[in-house]
Amino acid sequence: MPQEQLLKFIKNICKDKKVAIKPETLLFKEKVLDSMNILDLMGYIEKQLGRRLTDEEIIASNFESVRKIEEIFFKKI
């Protein structure tokens, strides 16, 4: 998945539309994402992968940044 698509999706679900999101932005520490819109992000990732995320994959550290999401979920494709 192109990084730009993932960045665009996160910007779309982010409450603060003016926030600058880069691949290394810490999505929770910088309050880009919260506990509600992480569910939207997980659904988006599942749709892109064509499968459900496993319990082992659903840990906060896997979603800390766009770069980490790509590394964990999309480098395997």
Image (spheres, grey):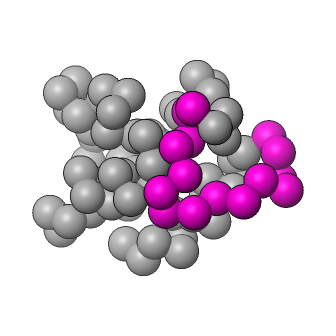
- Judge whether residue 35 is colored magenta: no
Visible residue check, residue 49 = no
Visible residue check, residue 17 = yes
Front-most of residues 37 and 52:
37
- Position of residue 40 measured from the top left corner of the image (x, y, whole percent): 56, 39
Quarter-of-image position of residue 67: bottom left
- Position of residue 65 measured from the top left corner of the image (x, y, whole percent): 45, 49
Q: Is residue 29 above or below residue 47?
A: above
Q: Main secondary structure of the magenta part?
A: loop
Number of on-image labels: 0
Quarter-of-image position of residue 62: top left
Quarter-of-image position of residue 15: top right
Q: Is residue 24 above or below residue 26?
A: below
Left or right, 77 with respect to 14, comes to left
Residue under the image location 83 percent in, 53 percent down: 17
Quadrant where the C terminus lies? bottom left
Quadrant where the N terminus lies? bottom left
Range covered by the magenta-colored residues: 15-29
